[in-house]
Image (spheres, rainbow, N blue to C red):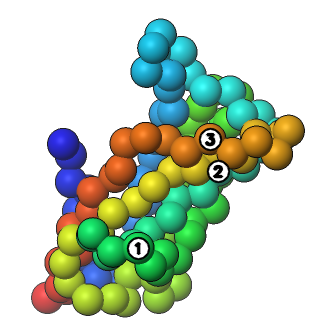
Amino acid sequence: MRIYQLVKGDQAPQIQAVLTRDDDGSVINFSGGSCALKFRAKDTTTVLFTLAGAGDFSAGTVVFSFTGSQLDIAEGYYQGEIEITHPSGNVETIFEILEFYLRADF
């Protein structure tokens, strides 16, 4: 399992993902839809914020950008969940939970 590393107070880090199907490895084409990353403290249920994704959705590529004061939170472990909304309005949640560690700045 990969742990994405972030620094408290940063305003420009980005996470990029290529969303694929587990069964055959093909990319998930959700062109015309949207994608979001829900961010919470590890093992809690309260979503702290949601990042809108941008990218080439036809190729399953999405980038999530942290901005403003989103990372002005306590040092520790966090989790992220990616959710796709297809053009039809149907929602598809990526099963794998992303793991993050936020460290204090110098």
Q: Position of residue 69 (x, y in %)?
A: 47, 88
Q: Position of residue 20 (x, y in %)?
A: 50, 26
Label 1–label 3 contact, CB within 8 A: no
Inspect the image, locate mark 3, and give the three-letter code of the amino acid beneath it.
Glu
Inspect the image, locate mark 1, and give the three-letter code of the amino acid beneath it.
Thr
Q: Position of residue 19 (x, y in %)?
A: 51, 33
Q: Position of residue 45 (x, y in %)?
A: 41, 73
Residue at 66 percent of width and 36 percent of height: 56
Q: Secondary structure at mark 3?
A: strand
Label 1–label 2 contact, CB within 8 A: no
The quadrant the C terminus occupies is: bottom left
Q: Which residue is mark 1?
A: 45
Q: Which residue is mark 3?
A: 92
Q: Which quadrant of the structure image shows residue 57?
A: top right
> Vertical placement of 35 versus 66: above or below?
above
Q: Secondary structure at mark 2?
A: strand
Q: Which residue is mark 2?
A: 35
Neighbourhood count class around disc 3 (C-alpha, 10 Å): few under 14, some 14–19, many 20 upward = few
Badge 1 or badge 3: first in the primary sequence: 1
Q: Which quadrant of the structure image shows residue 44?
A: bottom left
